[in-house]
Amino acid sequence: MTSKGRYQHNKYCYQSILRLASLPPSHPLAPMIDQCARLCPQYHLTTFHILLHLYPTNPLLIETIQSSSRHPTHLSPFTTTVLDSKETSIILDNLAATTFRTHIYSDGSGIKGNVGSAAVWIKNGITHCTLQCHLGKLAKHTVYESELVGIILALEIVHKAGCSMPCPICISLDNQAAIKAPRLNNMASGQHLIRALTHSALHIQKACPSHQKTTLQWVVGHRDVLGNELADTAAKEATRGASSSRQTLPLILRTPLPLSISALHQQHLSTLKNLWSLRWKKSPCYPRLCQTDPALPLDSFLCLITKAALTRTQSSLLFQLHTRHIPLNLHLHCIKKATSSCCLTCEAPRETVHHFLLECLSYDAHREPLCHRWKHLSQDISFLLSDPKAIATTIDFIHATGRLQQTLSELSNH
Ligand SMILES: [Zn+2]
């Protein structure tokens, strides 16, 4: 297995163990997973024992993901407003001051490796009540979770105020995914929070029949909307550890939340990426590839071929130019497929990619359009092979020379 394959294998194994650890108790495999996580026998290990030994995971600490987040017949206790335009959302937010008698802003934030949430009740243009909650490390909880917790905090403010709170009520936040979540019925991470906020909203409606459906409204973030800015500041304080007293928080937030499988997966991916990056930097290929594109061979190369709209053959040619494993005489001689490393046309001693693209006198006429278009940049091999704008002209030059026509016949279709 290649080193890249090993990392992919590691990624999928951890993904599988997280999914198994998050199964609901009613699932036939759940008791087996719990038992395998607790005890590891010396002999006759099952696949679960091996996976849980390689990736120690405690299912009791991890969130449970049900096959659906709500009963299909249950109606959402929220009215949601999500607009396409950022400007319209600001106008609607200004109108909310007259449309709604109570306006609460919530926000979630993840900075410097920590996550926090806050909800701020704005009354007559000033902060009337604030609730904050520090969720913990970003390695264990996602920003999406913090947005859902922000809604739970806002509903707690409504719950505490009881029937005295003026209706109708609007909760504004800047995260569309969190607003749409209570209406969806999927197996996504964060289900326990969606169930908690739905339960809270239903409880409020039941306790105070005068309360209509609470509105969840999207407002664009970081555009100087007063309530959103206040909630954002409070959420950032929460990431630094600020939290409202335990008694004022809803029950679900008085104890640590179960770990998010999404956050754990992201953390694992990040660790794998760092390990792979360290390994790659020790590779003998690294110094050579680094000269052309320091980001190779990561996702940036895929972005590059997408941006430059290259065909399969052209992408292959570009990668061969980057790696220097291309049918020019220096490489052919190295792999014993050519008798000499000399350039056949100008008899230079080494036909390298650099020689072929920039120096070979035989191709001066073909190089003219490149020099004319890119001026001094046409002498920069890194620019010619790594800039999406330049790649098409570089490929045109190679096609015009006909040097690689024999091996890359489809190039002429460009
Ligand atoms: Zn030459």
Image (cartoon, rainbow, N blue to C red):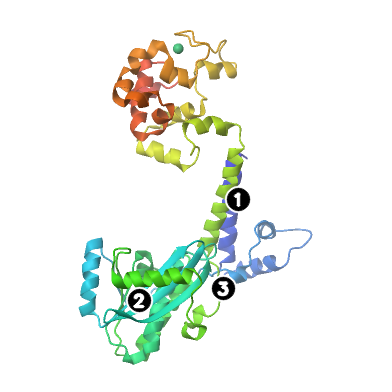
| Residue position for label 2 | 76
Classify residue 125 by image quadrant. bottom left
Q: First in sequence: mark 1 or mark 3?
A: 1
| Amino acid bearing label 1 | Asn
**Quick one: quadrant of the C terminus?**
top left
Spatial distance from mark 3 to mark 2, Cα to Cα? Answer: 25 Å
Residue 215 locus on image (x, y percent): 30, 76
| Amino acid bearing label 2 | Ser
Q: Residue at x 68, y 69 (%)?
A: 35
Spatial distance from mark 1 to mark 3, Cα to Cα? Answer: 28 Å
Spatial distance from mark 2 to mark 1, Cα to Cα? Answer: 39 Å
Q: Secondary structure at mark 3?
A: loop
| Residue position for label 3 | 26
Q: Can you say whether 25 is above or below 384 in the image? A: below
**Quick one: quadrant of the N terminus?**
top right
Circles 2 and 1 in contact, beta carbons < 8 Å = no
State whether residue 166 appears in this view.
yes
Mark 3, Cα crowd under 10 Å, few <14 / some 14-19 / many 20+, is few
